[in-house]
Amino acid sequence: MSTDAPHRRDLALFDFDGTLTTREMLPDFFRRAIPRPRRWLGTMLLAPLIVGYRLGWVPGTVVRAAIVRVGMAGLPLADYRRHGEAFAADVLPGVLRPEAMARLRWHQARGDTVVVVSGAFDVYLEPWGRQHGVDVICSSLAHDGRHLTGRYQGPQCVRADKPARVLARYDLSAFHCVHAYGDTVEDLDLLALAHHRHYRGRELTGPAP
């Protein structure tokens, strides 16, 4: 009987928005899921926050939480889930980066464990993950069983929460090597977990930007 130790596969961690897709997808989903009158109201109420975000003065976590609070509080849970399933099926296939998906498939062909770690909503990212055979760690919205409350369920899955959730689910010592892929500063904590760190399509050999 062989006494060789079992081969340990790698762990590949992918951000979603901007890494696997050509752009951030939450604004597209908000336009789909939030009724038009609420979008108009939200545009007026949140305009200063959005301008501050674009100028780099306001964190994305603050802007996203405000949009969820103003635009999604009280929306029927069934409608929210329906929009998520449709978004995964109809929209996401058209915005995937071919080169990034090829890299994801390369990891799968090697037998690696592939995980998408994203601030995106589970309502559309989980159906997409099932379709592509990858694990998903992402953000969730709170609800009372019938309606959305207008708040996140726990912290948004960005920045330090990304590696924290990965470490809570996976024992990194069980893997031979860790790869991570991201495209914004909100991914840098995730990249810090990895032996091989890829930022905006290029492998980093020095400090992260």
Image: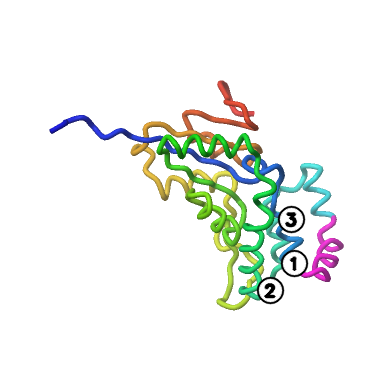
Q: Disc 2 and disc 3: Cα gap in Å?
A: 17 Å
Colour scheme of the rendered structure: rainbow
Residue 37, percent from left and from top = 83, 71
Label pair 1/2, CB-CB below 8 angstroms: yes
**Type of amino acid at the residue the image marks with label 2:** Leu
Identify the residue under disc 2: 75
Q: Quadrant of the C terminus?
A: top right
Q: Residue 194 in the image: x percent, y percent?
A: 48, 33
Secondary-structure class at tag 3 = helix
Left or right of 2, for residue 169: right
In the rendered structure, find residue 28 and report the number of the disc placed on it. 3
Label 2: which secondary element: loop
Give the amino acid type for the residue marked by disc 3 in the picture: Asp
Q: Residues within 10 Å of mark 3 (few under 14, many from 20)?
A: few
Distance, label 1 to label 2, CA atoms, is 8 Å
N-terminal-most mark, 2 or 3: 3
Residue furthest to the bottom in view is 146
- Of the numbered discs 1 and 2, the one sitting upstream in the chain is 1
Residues in magenta, as a range: 35-47
**Residue 40 magenta-highlighted:** yes
Circles 3 and 1, Cβ within 8 Å, touching? The answer is: no
Q: Which residue is mark 1?
A: 34
* Amino acid at dot 1: Ile
What residue is drawn where x is 84% and y is 61%? 43
